[in-house]
């Protein structure tokens, strides 16, 4: 249908004016047609919520749009009637608080939400029998207040029409409801877990148990109950395992960590295990009517175990806020007291100098179980399962971007969702990034880099990338200098891209030292030697503007170079890396059996690469502002010549009080610093200007004196 923004606003105004939540609020009681009132733009007397916002009445043109879209969406397009293409069926609830008219036998009941007598919100209308049967409708009259409570729940909702005097009500249609199914008996743990909503069932659906939790309830009463969890995360896919121990029988469970999962986010895996354990414990307590007691809850993640304190307050800025809030709400709703305790993880991989504690042993077991469950899920399908983005029971407000869930509604996340597409399009529109290369960029690594480096470096990268830094072409455009010549090599146009490619005045030595430092930093991070070699070759070729030599490099490394070529190597030096580098290094870490973070490696990579450009920028500024260059040397020679000429003139054009300027030794004066000589020259020029001004005034006075003398002589002698 593709309505415009103005049409959507008109439809919204009409809906609000009719006080309608859904299609059922503007259809007849039988669910077969749109009501006459809703079609003509009159609020219904049959179905009205007790409270509603104040809205203005839409204009006639809005109702035309309203009827047009109703016909196109729900009715037969070319028919004049208001019958729905598909009826709504029976009502789900036998009684609700929004429908006002109900019929039972010969009585019509009217609910009055705004009745003057709150104790009597109902009126009963009596059946009116007539000799004629007009339209085959049942009519009711003589409404009287009902003092008794709500009538029998077997009432049938009715759509009515009142006459002009509102004294006779005619039934237009009635609607039946679907008989309620009896609630299942929840007298077993399995039945209670099946009755959980999907938002909570995922966390405790895979269990291994020998009882319904009776022995665990005894442990709660004795104060020996313990809950321990652990998680496993690989390749962006996570699992969690938990155990309920302390009694004669243990209950273990596993679950798949819901998305989104960031790279290396073990915190979310731990929260998933804790949440599943608390949900299971709450169901056991509800099954056996446990109202008090204490349970020790433990895991090897300090940030996750802090969330289990009853007085902990979740904040939207927290990472994984959705799971934190859901866990916190489950603990608040729990009838028992939770005692958080942190245990050291992976004790089985360290040399055992002592025996493991009870909780440490349980944590090791859950670590094995989580890893085993991860391997089982990975083998169950030809491709690695992806984390499911879903709602969580108790998390409250949610933030979604399409089908992708945002784990926390923080200011940074909201700003990123709104502004990131606009920012990326700005860089593409201004041709700093190619549109085809945008999907290849690892923006997560760029964001992490900007959080790591100081503010002055961030500002330099942005200004340098957008060509708004103080290079020759920019300074000339800003009228800060008369030319755009490079201070190092003398190139006639010094641009931001020229800074890293310049070969003049020691730039090659600086680049070689920076590249050597880059290689050392990457070796310290256990980087794949092929990656270091490929990046070094590519940066050298980019700087010398020659083709990249890819002979001897593996195929996957060549593909990474091709992706980076599409993005640009200047952009790489400014913080925009290809995603392929992350994938290659992750595989390298897996081959090495290393547990180093790939996110930290990406930050180190971009830091080391951006340092190459930064060193070139610092060297360029050092040459421009602190080293004597040919242009500066020529300017100093001109300054010395001008000082010499002014000094030779001596006292001839200086006043008595300014002649001390020429009393210095010329040789010593020329040995002074540049700023001293500039100040001396400016002072002498100002003194000479004052001398010339006074001399001009004196000459004017002499001329006036001569003219006055001639006039007096003519007056006295009458001779000219």
Image: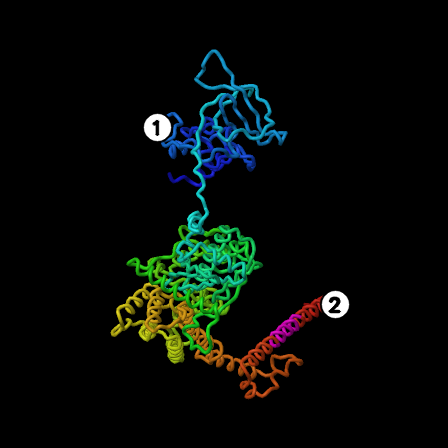
Q: Is residue 385 magenta?
A: no
Q: Residue furthest top?
A: 131
* Residue beneath disc 2: 716
* Residue beneath disc 1: 78
Query: Mark 2 and mark 1: span between their CA atoms?
Result: 121 Å
Identify which residue, 376 or 172, lies in the foreground.
376
Q: Within 10 Å of the Cα at label 2, are there few (<14), some (14-19), or many (20+) other Cα atoms?
A: few
Lateral position of residue 442 relative to residue 148, left or right? left
Q: From the top left corner, tell me how far across and down residue 703 is, in percent.
A: 65, 70
Instruction: Tell me the magenta residue range.
Output: 687-700
Q: Is residue 698 magenta?
A: yes
Q: Is residue 261 visible?
A: yes
Nearer the observer, disc 2 or disc 1? Answer: 1
Q: From the top left corner, tell me how far across and down residue 712 is, in percent.
A: 72, 68
Query: 212 above or below 229?
Result: above
Mark 2 or mark 1: which comes first in sequence? 1
Q: Main secondary structure of the magenta part?
A: helix
Q: Is residue 322 visible?
A: no
Identify which residue, 412 or 269, lies in the foreground.
269
Query: 601 above or below 206?
Result: below
Query: 66 above or below 718?
Result: above
For mark 2, give the secondary structure: helix
Residue 489 in which image quadrant: bottom left
Q: From the top left corner, tell me how far across and down residue 69 is, in percent.
A: 41, 34
For mark 1, give the secondary structure: loop
Query: 720 above or below 390?
Result: below
């Amino acid at each position: 249908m593709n309505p415009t923004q103005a049409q959507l606003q008109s439809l919204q105004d009409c809906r609000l004016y009719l006080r309608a939540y859904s299609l059922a609020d503007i259809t007849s009681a039988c669910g077969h047609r749109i009501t006459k009132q809703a079609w003509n733009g009159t609020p219904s007397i049959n179905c009205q919520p007790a409270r509603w916002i104040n809205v203005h009445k839409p204009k006639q043109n809005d109702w035309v749009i309203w009827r047009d879209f109703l016909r196109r969406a729900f009715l037969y397009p070319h028919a004049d009637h208001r019958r729905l293409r598909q009826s709504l069926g029976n009502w789900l609830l036998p009684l609700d608080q929004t429908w006002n008219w109900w019929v039972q036998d010969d009585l019509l009941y009217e609910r009055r939400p705004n009745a003057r007598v709150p104790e009597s919100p109902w009126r009963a209308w009596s059946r009116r029998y007539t000799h004629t049967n007009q339209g085959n409708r049942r009519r009711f009259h003589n409404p009287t207040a009902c003092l008794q409570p709500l009538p029998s729940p077997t009432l049938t909702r009715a759509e009515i029409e009142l006459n002009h005097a509102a004294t006779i009500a005619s039934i237009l249609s009635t609607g039946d409801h679907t008989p309620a199914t009896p609630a299942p008996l929840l007298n077993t743990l399995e039945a209670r877990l099946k009755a959980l909503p999907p938002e909570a069932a995922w966390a405790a659906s895979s269990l291994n148990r020998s009882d319904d939790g009776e022995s665990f309830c005894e442990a709660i009463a004795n104060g020996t109950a313990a809950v321990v969890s652990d998680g496993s995360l690989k390749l962006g896919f996570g699992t969690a395992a938990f155990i309920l121990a302390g009694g004669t029988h243990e209950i273990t469970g596993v679950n798949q960590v819901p998305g989104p999962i960031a790279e290396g986010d073990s915190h979310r895996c731990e929260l998933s295990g804790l949440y599943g354990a608390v949900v299971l414990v709450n169901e056991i307590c509800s099954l056996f009517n446990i109202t008090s007691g204490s349970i020790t809850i433990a895991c090897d993640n300090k940030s996750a175990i802090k969330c289990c304190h009853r007085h902990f307050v979740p904040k939207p800025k927290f990472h994984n806020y959705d799971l934190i809030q859901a866990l916190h709400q489950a603990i608040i709703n729990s009838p028992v007291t939770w005692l958080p305790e942190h245990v050291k993880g992976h004790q089985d991989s360290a040399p055992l100098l002592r025996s493991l504690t009870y909780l440490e042993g349980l944590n090791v077991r859950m670590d094995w179980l989580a890893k085993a469950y991860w391997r089982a899920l990975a083998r169950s399908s030809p491709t690695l399962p992806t984390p499911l983005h879903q709602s969580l029971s108790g998390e409250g407000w949610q933030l979604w971007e399409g089908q992708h869930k945002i784990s926390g509604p923080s200011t940074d996340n909201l700003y990123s969702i709104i502004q990131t597409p606009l920012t990326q399009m700005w860089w593409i529109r201004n041709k700093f990034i190619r549109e085809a290369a945008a999907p290849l960029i690892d923006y997560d690594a760029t964001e992490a880099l900007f959080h790591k480096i100081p503010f002055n470096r961030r500002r330099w990268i942005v200004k340098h990338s957008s060509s708004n830094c103080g290079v020759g072409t920019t300074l000339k455009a800003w009228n800060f200098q008369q030319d755009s010549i490079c201070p190092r090599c003398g190139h006639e146009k010094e641009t931001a891209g020229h800074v890293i490619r310049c070969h003049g005045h020691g730039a090659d030595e600086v680049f070689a030292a920076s590249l050597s430092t880059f290689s050392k930093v990457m070796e310290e991070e256990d980087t794949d030697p092929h990656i270091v070699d490929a990046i070094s070759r590519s940066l050298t070729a980019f700087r010398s503007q020659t083709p990249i030599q890819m002979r001897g490099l593996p195929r996957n490394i060549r593909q990474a170079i091709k992706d980076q070529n599409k993005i640009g190597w200047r952009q790489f030096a400014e913080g925009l890396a290809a995603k392929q580098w992350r994938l290659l290094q992750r595989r390298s870490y897996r081959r090495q059996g290393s547990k180093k973070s790939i996110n930290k490696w990406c930050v180190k990579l971009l830091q080391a690469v951006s340092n190459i450009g930064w060193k070139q920028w610092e060297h360029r500024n050092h040459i421009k502002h602190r080293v004597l260059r040919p242009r500066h040397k020529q300017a100093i020679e001109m300054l010395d010549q001008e000082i010499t000429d002014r000094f030779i003139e001596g006292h001839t054009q200086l006043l008595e009080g300014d002649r001390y300027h020429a009393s210095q030794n010329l040789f010593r004066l020329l040995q002074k610093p540049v700023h001293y000589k500039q100040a001396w020259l400016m002072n002498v020029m100002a003194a000479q200007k004052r001398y010339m001004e006074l001399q001009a005034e004196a000459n004017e006075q002499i001329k006036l004196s001569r003219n006055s003398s001639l006039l007096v002589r003519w007056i006295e002698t009458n001779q000219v």
